[in-house]
């Protein structure tokens, strides 16, 4: 059964750092493009970053230069290193896995709260 499980969220002061992890199971992880999205109450889920199967990365302008996405295929895990956090980064962060025309997989989300 395919599953994504996020961890690493929490409460941090502005300017601080967090590293989110997303562990995948039940999929051939290395062939999937992996991504992170975030969502605040009442708002749509916004794209944050993507890493392709070959390791190419892309970032939303709002996080470029502060966040880094990476993957460890041996551990079936994708990471999101978040530095210089701002209160506006507060959201539930979701991991997603995408391959071809298959429906995307989503994790359950992890809360990140940045205090000012």
Image: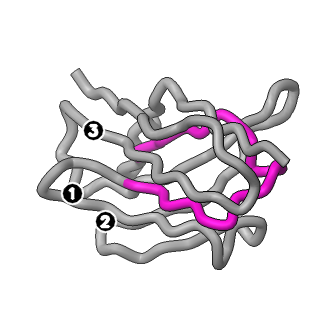
Q: Which mark is residue 24?
A: 3
Residue ID for mark 1? 30
Discs 1, 2 touching: Cβ within 8 Å: yes
Classify mark 2: residues with Cα within 10 Å, few (<14), some (14-19) or many (20+).
Answer: some
Count of numbered tags = 3
Circle on res. 53: 2
Q: In front: 66, or 11?
A: 11
Separation of residues labelled 3 and 1 (CA atoms) = 10 Å
Quadrant housing residue 12: top right
Rendered location of residue 50, percent (x, y) = 51, 62
**Residue drawn 41% across the image and 48% down it:** 98
Check the image and name the residue furthest to the left.
Answer: 74
Of badges 3 and 2, nearer the viewer stands: 3
Of the two numbered discs 1 and 2 on the same chain, state the one appearing first in sequence: 1
Residues rendered magenta in the picture: 79-97
Q: Does the magenta stretch include residue 105?
A: no
The relative height of residue 111 versus residue 50 in the rendered view (above or below) is above
Q: What element carries label 2?
A: loop
- On the image, the x and y values in percent for residue 30 come to 21, 57
Q: Earlier in the sequence, mark 3 or mark 1?
A: 3
Secondary structure category for the residue under label 1: helix
The N terminus, quarter of image? top left
Mark 3: secondary structure: strand
Instruction: Inspect the magenta stretch and tell me whether residue 90 lies in it.
Output: yes
- Left or right relative to 76: residue 41: right
In this rendered view, identify the residue nearer to me: 15 or 65: 15
Q: Residue at x 53, y 52 (%)?
A: 18
Mark 1 neighbour density, 10 Å: few (under 14) some (14–19) many (20 or more)? some
- Disc 3 + disc 1, Cβ < 8 Å: no
Decide: is 104 above or below 108: below
Query: Alpha-carbon neighbours of circle 3 within 10 Å: few (<14), some, or many (≥20)?
Result: many
């Amino acid at each position: 059964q395919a599953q994504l499980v996020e961890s690493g969220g929490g409460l941090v002061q502005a300017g601080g750092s967090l590293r989110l992890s997303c562990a995948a199971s039940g999929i051939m992880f290395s062939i999937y493009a992996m991504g992170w999205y975030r969502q605040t109450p009442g708002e749509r889920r916004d794209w944050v970053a993507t890493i392709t199967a070959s390791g190419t990365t892309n970032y939303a302008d709002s996080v470029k230069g502060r966040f880094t996405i990476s993957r460890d295929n041996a551990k079936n895990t994708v990471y999101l290193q978040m530095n210089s956090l701002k209160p506006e980064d507060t959201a539930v962060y979701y991991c997603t896995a995408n391959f071809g025309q298959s429906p995307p997989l989503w994790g359950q989300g992890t809360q990140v709260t940045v205090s000012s």
